[in-house]
Amino acid sequence: MSVVIVGASGHGREVLDVVEACGVDFEGFVDDGNPDLSVLERRGGAHLGGIDRLVGHSGTVVLGLGESATRRHVGTSLDGAIRWEVALVHPLASVGSAVQLGDGTIVAAGARLTTGITVGRHCYIGPNATVGHDAVFEDFVTVLPGATISGGVRLGIGSLVGTGANIRQGVTVGAGATIGAGAVVLEDVPGGTTVVGVPARPLGTDRDES
């Protein structure tokens, strides 16, 4: 198996670390933007061209796009045209019993998933994030480094959990919601909402209750 990564930014290079650690051959990056070719050269990754280079591609593709919304847009647009068929778990991650990982999902070094967890397609679980028992991630979820997802949490499609955030057991986070870095989430978060702070509240909410 060989892999092409969509997205040649820093996040794409982090995904390349996982690809290489898994012992998978890497073909190169595709990116419609203007990636820094000198950085890619130092990293040993070729820029193959834009996403249109994937037309007729017979190998496996993974998404190296850090934002859930962008990953969802690109992944949905490519569905049916290319092969995903793979989830990649860094060998320094820990994945427990009865864990299901959807196609295109990436689990980075140091992440820890316990038991009974279901992760959808094209999710990203960052370095040193922890995921408790029976959590459910719908497609295109992003969990950034050091976040803590407690047992029974449900993360809706395209939601994003910021660096170092903590989500209490049993909480549901709606589709497209964003949990700010370092937030402590004690209650359900409606879809499309951004919450920040300790305890987490919708962005812009007056936090002075005196």
Image: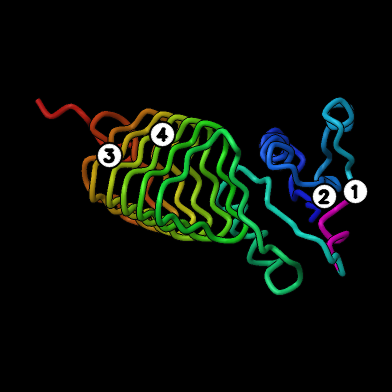
10 Å neighbourhood of mark 1: few (<14), some, or many (≥20)?
some
Q: Is residue 82 positioned above or below 45 on the image? A: below
**Residue 129 colored in magenta in the image:** no
Observer-side mark, 4 or 3, equals 4
Q: Are the two marked residues, 1 and 4, in contact with CB atoms closer than 8 angstroms?
A: no
What residue is shown with label 2? 30
**Rendered location of residue 195, percent (x, y):** 34, 40
Q: Earlier in the sequence, mark 4 or mark 3?
A: 4
Q: Quadrant of residue 60?
A: bottom right
> Between 59 and 31, which is closer to the camera in this rendering?
59
Query: Which numbered disc covers residue 147?
Result: 4
Query: Which numbered disc covers residue 185?
Result: 3
What residue is shown with label 1? 48
Mark 2 belongs to which amino acid? Answer: Val
Mark 4 belongs to which amino acid? Answer: Ala
Mark 1 belongs to which amino acid? Answer: Leu
Q: Are the two marked residues, 2 and 1, in contact with CB atoms closer than 8 angstroms?
A: yes
> Between 140 and 36, which is closer to the camera in this rendering?
140
Residue span colored magenta: 48-55
Q: Earlier in the sequence, mark 2 or mark 1?
A: 2
